[in-house]
Amino acid sequence: MFVDRAKIFIRSGKGGDGHVSFRRELYVPNGGPDGGDGGNGGSVIFVVDKGLNTLVDYRNARKFKAEDGEEGGKRNCHGANGKDIILKVPQGTVIKDFETGKVIVDMSDKTEPVVLLKGGHGGKGNQHYVTSVMQAPKYAQPGQPAIEMCVLLELKMIADVGLVGFPSVGKSSLLARVSNARPKIAEYHFTTLTPNLGVVSVKNGSGFVMADIPGIIEGASEGKGLGLNFLRHIERTKVLIHVVDASGTSGRDTVDDIKKINEELASYSRNILDRPTVLAANKMDLLTPEEREISLSFITDEFPDYKIFPISAATGEGIPEMLLYVDKLVKEAPDDLIIFEPEIDIEELYDNPDLPFEVKKSDSDDHIYIIEGPRIEKMLGYTNLEAEKGFLFFQNFLKKNGILKMLEDLGIEDGDTVKMYGHEFDYYHE
C-alpha cells in the first residue's frame, strides 16, 4: 500500500531526577551526601532508509515515545539513560509541525540521523550542592521534562521528470513503455491512485527517473479530488512532460486541458510552472495524417513556446526522440536537489517562558554579573555552547528574553564577567 502522508505523535524521554541520600555506614553515622545523578531521557531520532518508498509503517502505529531516564540512586549511583527511539522514513520525507504546517526538517539530503526531539537531561544528585555553609543539602535537581508534539510526515518523491495531465490521457501507458515500472492501466478516470516511479534508459547510454503523477482535475490545488494529495510529488522534479490526448477520442479538448492543468500547477506553486516543460501529444496512432496535422496545428498555435512531440504510448512512435530531448533538459537543469528550508527552529521547543530567572550584580565584585534560575539552567542543559550553532542560539536566547538589556540597565561594561551555572563569559557590546 502506498501512503505518502501520516500524522504521528512523538515524545522524547524525561530526564531522571537526581537523588537525595547520605552515607550511612558502620562507624560513619553522619556521612556526607551521596545522591546520584538521574539518567538522560531518550531522544526521538529520524533516519532515511533508502529501501523504503512509502510511509505505510505509520498508517496504524501513530504514537512513538522514547524511554525516560531512571532516577539516580544512593552511593553515587547514576540512573540509567533512557533508550532512543529511531524512526525510519523514505528519502524525500518532509517533517512538518502538524499545528502550523511549517517545515521542521527535510530529510531528503540527510545522510546522518537527525535528532528531532532531544531527551531531557538527568537531574544532579544532592552531592553536587555541597557548599561551605551547606554540608548536608536535602534537595536534588529534577530531571528535565519530556518534549512532545504532533508532526506531519509528507513524502515528496524524488524524480528527475514528472508526468502530468488529466486522467486517462496515457501517462501510465507511457511510463510502462519507457521504463521498468508496471502501473495499473485502465480506461476510466482516476485509474492511477498512487504515484509510480520508473527508471528510463535513453539510447545515448544515459537515463533518468520518471514519476507518473496521478491525474489532476480542476480545483486540485484547492483540495478537490485526489490531485492535491499528489501535486507535492511534482515539486522536486527538474522537467515536466505534459501528456495530452491529441486524438479527441475521450471527448476532451486538448488546448483547454493544457490551460487548465497549467492553472492548477500555477495555483499550487509558481515555481512548478517555471520548470522546463515538454508537451507529449499522445494517441497519434488513432488519427489519420490529415487529422494529425490539424490537431498539432491547434496545439502549436496556442502554445508556440512549448516543444511538442507527437507520440503514441501504444506503438512507441515518437517516444525515443522525446526521451533524448528530455534527457538533455535534465542534464542542463541544476544538480542541486530541491530542499525545503526549515520554518521552525526546533530549539525553541525547549524554552519554557513560564520558568523564572534572575539577573543581578555580584555582591563581592562590581565587574561580575550573575544570571540564574530554572529557565537559564534548563536552557544550558540542552544547548551545546561548544558548537557555533549552539552558541548563536545562546546569544539569541539572551537577546530575545531581554537579558542583555537587563545587564545594560545594571551598568555592565565591556570586559565585565557574566557567570551562569559554571559558565563564564566576557561581555562586549555589539
Image (spheres, grey):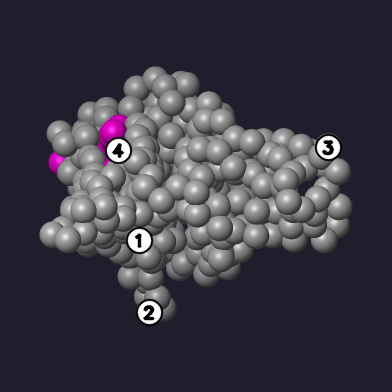
The numbered mark at residue 409 is 3
Q: Does the magenta stretch include residue 12?
A: yes
Q: Is mark 2 on a helix, strand or loop?
A: loop
Give me the C-alpha separation between circle 1 and circle 4: 16 Å
The residue singled out by tag 4 in the image is: 10
**Residue 268 lies in the magenta-colored region:** no
Q: Which of 42 and 10 is in front in this view?
A: 42
The outermost residue toward the bottom is: 205
Tell me the CA gap for discs 2 and 3. Answer: 70 Å
The residue carrying mark 2 is 205
Which residue lies at the image location 28% right of the left edge and 45% below the top edge?
Answer: 20
Which of the two labelled residues, at mark 2 and mark 4, occupies the earlier sequence position? 4
Give the distance between the C-alpha atoms of the residues marked 3 and 4, in whole angstroms.
Answer: 42 Å
Q: In this view, does 168 lie above or below 92?
A: above
Report the span colored magenta: 1-14
The amino acid type of the residue labelled 2 equals: Gly
Question: Mark 1 Cα within 10 Å, few/some/many (few <14, many 20+)?
Answer: some
Mark closest to the chain's N terminus, 3 or 1: 1
- Residue 261 seen anywhere in this rendered image of the structure: no
Q: Mark 1 points at which residue?
A: 113
Q: Is the Cβ of the residue at disc 2 closer than 8 Å to that at disc 4?
A: no
**Disc nearer the start of the sequence (3/4):** 4
| Residue 126 numbered tag | none
